[in-house]
Image: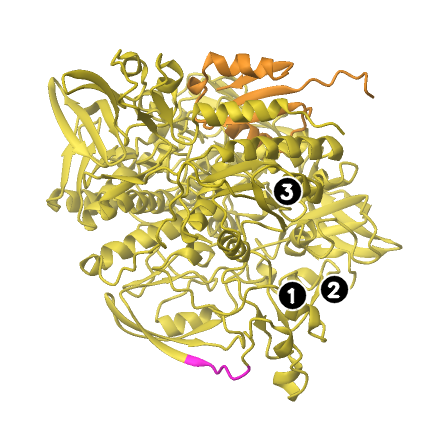
Amino acid sequence: MSEEFNPKVLGFLCNWCCYAAADSAGVSRYQYPPNLRTIRVMCTGRLDPAFVLKGFAEGAAGIFTGG
Amino acid sequence: MEAGRSPNIEILSNADFLGLDGKAGDFTAKVRLRPRYIDADKCTACGLCTKYCPRHLVDEYNEGLALTRPIHIDYPQAVPATYFIDPDACMHLQHGTCKICVPVCRSKAIDFDQKAETRQINVGAVIMSPGFGRVPEEALTKYSYGDHPDVVTSLEFERLLNPSGPFMGEVRCISDKRHPKNIAFIQCVGSRDLGCNNGYCSSVCCMYAIKEAMVAKEHDPDCEITVYYMDMRTQGKDFDAARTRAEEQFGIKFVRAKVADVMPWERQLKLTYATMDGKHHFEGYDMVVLSVGLDSPADAKNLAKTGAFDLNHYDFCKTSTFAPLASSHDGVLVAGAFQGPKDIPESVTQSSAAAGLVSGLIKKQRGKGVVTKTYPDEQAVAEDDEVRIGVFVCHCGINIAGVVDVAKVANYAGEMEDVTYYAESLYSCSQDAQEVLKQRIKEHRLNRVVIAACSPRTHEPLFQETLKDAGLNRSLFEMVNIRDHCSWVHANEPAAATDKSMDLVRMGVAKARNIKPLPEQTVPVTTKALVLGGGIAGMTAALNMADQGFQTYIVEKNGQLGGQLLKQHYTLQGDKVADLVKDVTGKIKKNKLIEVFTDADLSAVNGFVGNFTSTITVGKKETSVDHGIIVVATGGKYHQPETVLGAKLPDSKAIVTQNELEKQLAGKGKTRAPKSAVMIQCAGSRGDDLAYCSKTCCNDAVKNALKIKEINSASQVVVLYREMRTYGYAEDAYREAREKGVIFIPYAKDQMPKIDKKGAKAEVSFHDPILLEDVTIAPDQVILSVGIVPEDTEDISKLLKIPINADRFFLEAHVKLRPVEMPVAGVYVCGLAHAPKPLDEIIVQAQAAAAKAAIPLVKGYVSVEPTVSNVDKDACIGCGLCESLCPYKAIQIHKIDKKRKAETIVASCKGCGICASHCPTFAISMGGFTDEQITAQIKAFGEMREE
């Protein structure tokens, strides 16, 4: 099990579109891999490039932005 | 829940309506309040009394499928969240014994001395919304209901699916608790059935059967489900798409058949059915669900007598097409299923509309007696105060706890720095949980609250309101979504879902540590309305708002008011449309508060809710108007299909549309009715040219077929249809048409009729599923039932930044909860621009949109979300980057003391944060989404746990 690729992905989700989409994915019970950890923002325009770099520095295998 | 919280709504539960005196504007209603034997102010809904109550009682709320006790509450989220003693079952009230609940109750809420109390209430208007009743028993017993426990009604099945239901959300046979391997749904039980005097269609059963079948499939994907139906009436907005999903994605089988009977058959049930070709079949099922219709309420006659209004021939409240919510008694209105069977979105729309009509009726009294909710003084939370975080982890019944180990998550949260209190809760949104939350905030002096539950998009306002009640600034709050983003989407990976929940909670707590209180702000409103579209929807909305006292502008692109209504002549109910047009346009002309712009276009819109400025262009003249809200009623029109029945339409004068036929039939000529006619339903709809069902075409076909028969009873009319969707009372007309000799022949999508030109006539070839033969006829006229398309929604969509769906109709903010609101604040929708629908539904929807739109106008201000940008004037260097980037014109550079400084216009600010992420000097902070908070979340993300 420990050798399985199990990346941790950090996501920045726009409240109005991607966060809402993630909600409706839940309502529709779509199943997706449990690797994502999310931060809600009011718009992906809020994303300072520094946030992305900090995410990598903290060990994220990938950064997901949904907006 | 929201109604329960409003200080201006008094809920008299457990009450009877005894009398109504006076007249509209000044009624006296007599109401009897039955005792509940529990002091509502003292009861904390802890549930201890039910645990101790010694007597069992059949649980009516769970459709008799479970047991409860005489002292109980129906369900955890009930409003008011107060327990209740059933006087017919309580041992003390019946026999003077027991009373064990009295010492058990810690808050001393039990009060056996309560007596029934009669109250006289002075009101201006009455809205009847008693809901619906149950269909007669005989409609059920013919399917062995009552003889075999595994024949259940759809209402019982709904309880079985519910997490708080009898088997905690597991679908099991009642007989031996086994999981059913296959389930049959039987449609039209107690509907479209003259045998029990319910000739109408209940309109909702097809959709709820699909929903229940899909949910059951989710519970057990291996369970086979078959729906036996006459016509699948999925005529609502996006309903056909749900049906297709049920079939294609969930593998639910749909069989068009009449079910003859259901008999016990060893451990199973034998279902015998006849298909269209006359053949009989039978099939064994573990469980049979009867899709029961909606009947009129059991005490409808009594209510009508007390309220002095008329009922229709099915004992529902009698109303008319043009005033769908007015009962025959002036000042008494109706909303919901009592007006006629309907689903949740329509009931919610009707209730908004009724509230708006009442508001117009009693506008003279507006503002009198209004109770404004007061909150305790806000507790000051200073920068260097000790951070005391409370974390509440919600089970959401089994929605979360069924997957995520909630106790583990809560305990984990409890170990985090600054977390002074943590707890689990069954339903954190229930009223009693709100009380608990309030108490805990006070007891533990919490100054930050983290709720790990569902989505902040739906539930943040509710919890923030509780924070305010507890004297805490509402911004000191963070929600962690461990349901929609976790338990629901990782249902088969409980360990990973628990892991994810813990990570998300850690990140939430990290953010909470950095949250600061934010100020509450309000913005004044221009108390004027702008209505786009002068059809019946726009005119109704405008009249309604003017009736409430607000100046209204109508922008109509054509030369005159009336829209599509000008093309219509009569309704299925026999009303003359011209009368309505004359009446409404006349009222608009006379109304001094309404200004109409014809041949006009909306060329620009600026501003935000409460403070819009629009430019209306008529020819070359431009007029600028200020207004607080916008109602979009841009309408629709008949579709001109490119393809009909999968082929190009031949060019022939014998081929007309239903609307063209209507015009012809409304004339005076003696030979205006064709001697023979073939009507073709779904011509260019439902996957032909358009993807969707236009809801009105079946009614129009029946309407015109009846008209032909009325003019010339010897005329032959054949209707070729996919599914006759004459829902509601229109079913009566459908039956009448058949009785009068109109022939209805179904066709399948994979076996469509063919239209050919034959000389001056057109010829229709089709397969007759009863004769099992191909037939060709050449009638006088071929009539196409074409669908309805919206009128240029794209331009308005761009102008107002409001979304449209795949079929180009405007997409409402929430189908059930906000059916006439747009996602953009201050913009509302009604009529054909929202979706195809018949006239009475358009009128109600327009009244509802006006009612909702009037809310900010009546209040005179709008509250602004505190999550807006804020400029640190000292750090700002006045570079102007933010001003150039802001998509909402919400940040501007001003000269302050001769220095250029940025300033936020809070009412326009949407909180997107583009300014903050680009500010070179970090002078802009976003309320609720500061650099510190997001950085803390990212850091917490990195703190992986060692297992």
Task: Identify the mark at residue B146; answer none if there is no mark.
Answer: 2
Q: Taking B224 as reference, is B773 above or below it?
A: above
Identify the residue at horizontal 50%, vertical 35% (top origin). Answer: B512
**Element assignment for label 2:** loop
Res. B664 in view: yes
Left or right: where does residue B801 sit relative to residue B137?
Answer: left
Q: Taking B421 as reference, is B235 above or below it?
A: above
B8 or B773: nearer the viewer: B8
Q: Which x, y percent locates residue B328?
A: 32, 64
Identify the residue at horizontal 78%, vertical 57% (top origin). Answer: B174
From the rendered image, report the letter of the chain displayed in orange.
Answer: A
Q: Which residue is identified by label 3?
A: B414
Q: Quadrant of the C terminus of chain B?
A: top right
Q: Which residue is identified by label 1?
A: B137
User: Mark 3, residues whose alpha carbon is within 10 Å: few (<14), some, or many (≥20)?
Assistant: some
Amino acid type for the residue under numbered disc 2: Gly
Same chain check for tags 1 and 3: yes
Main SS of the magenta segment?
loop
Q: Which x, y percent locates residue B168?
A: 71, 52
The chain identifier of the residue carrying mark 1 reads B
